[in-house]
Image: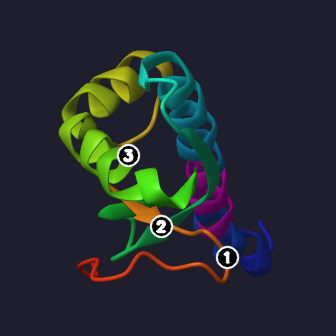
């Protein structure tokens, strides 16, 4: 086995895991979220050596961002259960973060 292949494998697994989490988050949100706002999964990012996964979402209208993020926070355990049922990977802690491009949520706590 080429040493270069071994060094890329964990990175490939991490990339695959972030794609799976982002895809499953989009499906979960589409099914569970109310129609008061549009919540779009932008991407997922693995942090803390795979112990945590940040799922970045865009929310429209921005005025609904607080309530949408509160909904996602309340549904974190249900989303973890969804991942257990639909993805075969070691489950990290999931955090949802706002990513509306240049727009920002005033007075929002930084995670």
Which x, y percent locates residue 91?
32, 43
- Name the residue at 35% across, 24% down: 84
Q: Does dot 3 land on a helix, a strand or a loop?
A: helix
User: Magenta segment: does it hold 17?
Assistant: yes
Q: Does dot 2 land on a helix, a strand or a loop?
A: strand
Q: Is residue 45 above or below residue 64?
A: below
How far apart marks 3 and 1 lie (CA) works out to: 17 Å
Q: How many marks?
A: 3
Residue 97 occupies quadrant: bottom left
Residue that mark 1 sits on: 101
User: Magenta segment: does it hold 51?
Assistant: no
Q: Residues within 10 Å of mark 2 (few under 14, many from 20)?
A: some
- Residue bounds of the magenta highlight: 11-18
- Can you tell which mark lies on residue 46? 2
Asked if residue 52 can be seen in this view, the reply is yes
Which circle's residue, 2 or 3, is located before the other in the chain? Answer: 2
Contact, CB < 8 Å: mark 3 with mark 1? no
- Secondary structure mostly taken by the magenta-highlighted segment of the chain: helix
Q: Nearer the viewer, mark 2 or mark 1?
A: 1
Residue 32 occupies quadrant: top left
- Can you tell which mark lies on residue 68? 3
Scheme of image coloration: rainbow
In this orientation, which residue lies closer to the viewer: 93 or 64? 64
């Amino acid at each position: 086995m080429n040493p270069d292949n071994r060094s890329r494998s964990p990175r490939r697994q991490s990339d695959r895991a972030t794609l799976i989490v982002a895809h499953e988050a989009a499906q979960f949100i589409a099914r569970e979220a109310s129609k008061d706002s549009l919540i779009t999964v932008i991407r997922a990012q693995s942090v803390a050596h795979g112990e945590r996964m940040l799922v970045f979402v865009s929310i429209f209208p921005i005025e609904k961002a607080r309530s949408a993020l509160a909904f996602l926070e309340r549904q974190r355990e249900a989303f973890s259960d969804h991942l257990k049922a639909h993805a075969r990977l070691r489950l990290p802690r999931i955090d949802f973060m706002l990513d509306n491009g240049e727009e920002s949520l005033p007075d929002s706590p930084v995670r």
